[in-house]
Amino acid sequence: MSQFSLSVRHTPPTQVIDLNGFLDAHTAPQLEQAFQEMLNAQHFNIIVNFRDLAYISSAGLGVFMAFIEDVRSNHGDIKLVGMSPKVYNVFDLLGFPMLYEIYDDEHQAQRKFIDSTPSIG
Amino acid sequence: MQRQTPYTVRFKQEFLARTEELHSIRQTVEGEAVRFGFDRETAFRLALAVDEASTNIIRHSYGGNPAQHFELEIATTGDQFIVMLTDHGKSFDPTLLPRLDMQRYFERCARGGLGVHIIKLVMDDVTYAVTGDRVNQLRMMKHLAA
């Protein structure tokens, strides 16, 4: 049984991680690896799309805590989008909206990244 | 004389101490909680709290040894929904952990400790007992009535 999957899309200037299924202590290492690969490739503008995520436990939340400092110290951010009310409630229960920007849809998060990207020239 | 409220065991099963079991543990808890009368949102939170407690047993009591096992019991008495987790690993009393200050937690970008915090936020009462020959028992209770 596949409980969790993720895929990565490049939508300049961001990388988008799409989550699907159940994110718990069993599946969180997959997300951890995806973040690690992104940081290794010097991608720091990251959007995580929760639209197809049914569940998250503290093991999943811990992955976001593990990378946020590194990402922000490289002038990037991890923005979270498309959470169902159930998943949002877990973030809210612990006060995570204090630390992370959470948007209803991906375009809003994209716009924030574009607006905060310094223009070259 | 007060009449004793019957104590009904609704579910009792051993699980291997491996994270693959978490999915079915959550389904069991959520299903029993809904059958007892909790709304979907509370049932979801109860399943989350039991996931966190089970994860701590798997990771910390047994240090990730998947050959070990622990027992999940769900019982009800009166308006109380009681979940008991019993293991024979390293004892760890989560009730002794101080309450997390999330503002400070975020400032320090800390990790760990969130599971116990969730259990305390979701449940109305949490007790931990170590008896006899390394039998660790975590009892978590939630009232049906708010």
Image (cartoon, rainbow, N blue to C red):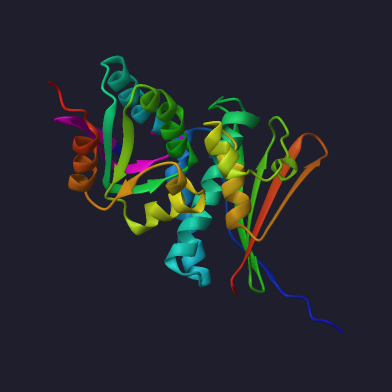
Q: Nearer the viewer, residue B106 or A117?
A: A117
Relative to B13, say whether A114 is above or below: above
Provide residue A66's location: percent of width, then percent of height.
45, 28
Based on the displayed image, in which of its 4 quarters is residue B58 positioned?
top right
Q: Nearer the viewer, residue A18 or A73?
A: A73
Q: Magenta segment, which residues? A: A5-27
Q: Could one spot residue B16 in this view of the protein? A: no
Q: Is residue A22 magenta?
A: yes
Report the side of B59 relative to A40 (left or right).
right
Question: Residue visible at 12% across and 20% down?
Answer: A121
Q: Nearer the viewer, residue A91 or A45?
A: A45
Relative to A79, say whether B77 is above or below: below
Provide residue B20's location: percent of width, then percent of height.
43, 36
Q: In the orientation shown, which residue stands out farthest toward the front?
A: A121
Question: Residue visible at 50% across and 50% down?
Answer: B48
Q: Nearer the viewer, residue B64 or B73?
A: B64
Question: Residue visible at 31% across and 39% down?
Answer: A79
Relative to A36, say whether A13 is above or below: below
Provide residue B96's location: percent of width, then percent of height.
75, 42
Q: Is residue A79 magenta?
A: no
Provide residue A42's location: percent of width, then percent of height.
27, 17
Relative to B84, say whether B39 is above or below: below
